[in-house]
Amino acid sequence: MFDRRHLLKTLVAASPAFAIGPALAEMRRPNLIVTKDPDCGCCEGWVEHMRAAGFRVEVVAVTEIGEVKARLGVPQDLAACHTAEIDGYVIEGHVPAEAVKRLLNEKPNAKGLAVPGMPLGSPGMEVRGVDPSIYEVVLFGPAGRAAFAKYKGLRQV
């Protein structure tokens, strides 16, 4: 039978394990490899957004990004300014980190996620003093396409 003192000692002893859990999850997360034009500033903004969310990011600068998109099977109408790869998925454009984490947790049978174009207010496309657009994150793959999430800026709506 536990008394209050024994319970408190047990909780204090276990607290380091609780702190280590999230750190281990971050260490297990695969690298995000981002292919982008070397001169693209908004892509750098997205890379910083992903790093701030805990992703380990490797950036590959190329001048012919279209070849990468074609190799990875990104549909032309879903194309954006940069393309990333993580754990067998393609991440096209300014997809919020929250959506990428959800993708990695749920592991749907799909090619990846895309935010076509460059919606104002999406990660890396923020403009101070301007209301962000509402935009859709599209799940795409062999089975077709589906809405994965809808955002206004970084807030899911």
Image (tube, grey):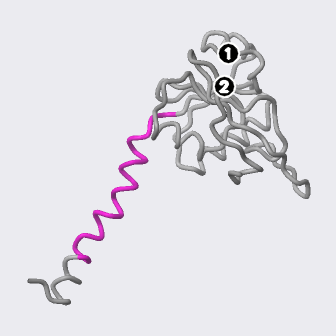
Q: Camera-side residue: 94 or 4?
A: 4
Does the segment drawn in magenta span residue 20? yes
User: Mark 2 falls on what kind of element?
Assistant: strand
- 148 left or right, relative to 104: right
Mark 1 or mark 2: whose residue is earlier in sequence: 1
In this rendering, the answer to whether 75 lies above or below 1 is above
| Quadrant of the snapshot with the N terminus | bottom left
* Residue at 47% from the left image edge and 28% from the top image edge: 87
User: Mark 1 falls on what kind of element?
Assistant: helix
Q: Please name the residue that numbered disc 1 is placed on.
A: 69
Q: Please name the residue that numbered disc 2 is placed on.
A: 83
Q: Tell me if mark 1 has few (under 14), some (14-19) or many (20+) residues whose alpha carbon lies within 10 angstroms of its own.
A: many
| Real-space CA distance between mark 1 and mark 2, rounded to the nearest whole angstrom | 7 Å
Extreme residue toward the left, this view: 1
* Residue at 84% from the left image edge and 50% from the top image edge: 132
Give the extent of the magenta segment: 11-31
Residue 140 falls in which quadrant of the image?
top right
Q: Identify the main secondary structure in magenta.
A: helix
Q: Position of residue 79 (x, y in %)?
A: 75, 22
Mark 1–mark 2 CB contact (< 8 Å): yes
Which amino acid, by three-letter code, is at mark 1? Lys
Count every numbered label the image shows and give the total: 2
